[in-house]
Image: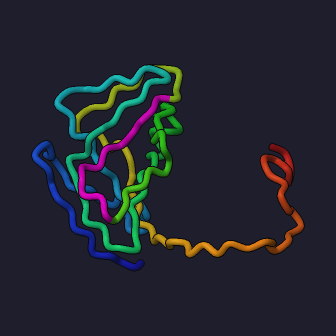
Amino acid sequence: MQTLKVKIKKLENFHGELPAYQSAGASGFDVRAQLSGPVVLNPGEKAMIPTGLSFEIPLGYEIQARPRSGLAAKNGLTVLNTPGTIDADYRGEVKIILINLGNEPFTINDQERCAQLVIAPVYQAIFEVVNELGSTERGAGGFGSTGRA
């Protein structure tokens, strides 16, 4: 397992436990909601959930915010802009945009593990304008063109 040093800042609204990997092989670390009171998300509703944390991410990397699989599978709670991107040059508070796609209201409590964050490498493209692109068997087919949609 490779490691990368990432600086983390606890903001004024932060209390409780720092993010943590829940197993030795986990790729994502859980972040907790920093709330002054419960937030109820009715079906179809969304909310920005503060984490009370900001990061100094090394250039060449990003942090991706992803849903926690248990909350998604059991309750329909997911990260709206999955994966949410936290850029290396962003220094503000990380907030998680949650949406309830389930059929029942869901209550998010203070200190609840609301998302997982994953460190990922980033490549910036050097664009080259051309008149032709290489051909493939698929070609320009999309949106279900390779099988059942």
- In the depicted structure, whether residue 88 falls above or below residue 13: below
Q: Quadrant of the C terminus?
A: top right
Quarter of the image for residue 24 reads: bottom left
Front-most of 131 and 120? 131
Judge whether residue 47 is colored magenta. Answer: no
Front-most of 143 and 18? 143
Image coordinates for residue 98, horizontal then vertical, percent: 41, 36
* Farthest-out residue, bottom: 2
Q: Residue at x 81, y 47 (%)?
A: 144
Q: What colouring method underlies this structural image?
A: rainbow
Q: Residue at x 53, y 38 (%)?
A: 73
Image coordinates for residue 56, horizontal then vertical, percent: 25, 66
Q: Residue at x 35, y 58 (%)?
A: 29
Quarter of the image for residue 2 reads: bottom left
Image coordinates for residue 70, horizontal then vertical, percent: 47, 42
Q: Number of labelled discs?
A: 0
- In the depicted structure, whether residue 83 falls above or below residue 55: above
- In the depicted structure, whether residue 108 falls above or below residue 14: above
Q: Quadrant of the N terminus?
A: bottom left
Look at the image and give the residue range highlighted in magenta.
Answer: 89-100
* Farthest-out residue, left: 12
* Farthest-out residue, right: 137
Image coordinates for residue 146, horizontal then vertical, percent: 85, 54
Q: Is residue 72 left or right of residue 140?
A: left
Q: Is residue 19 left or right of residue 103?
A: left
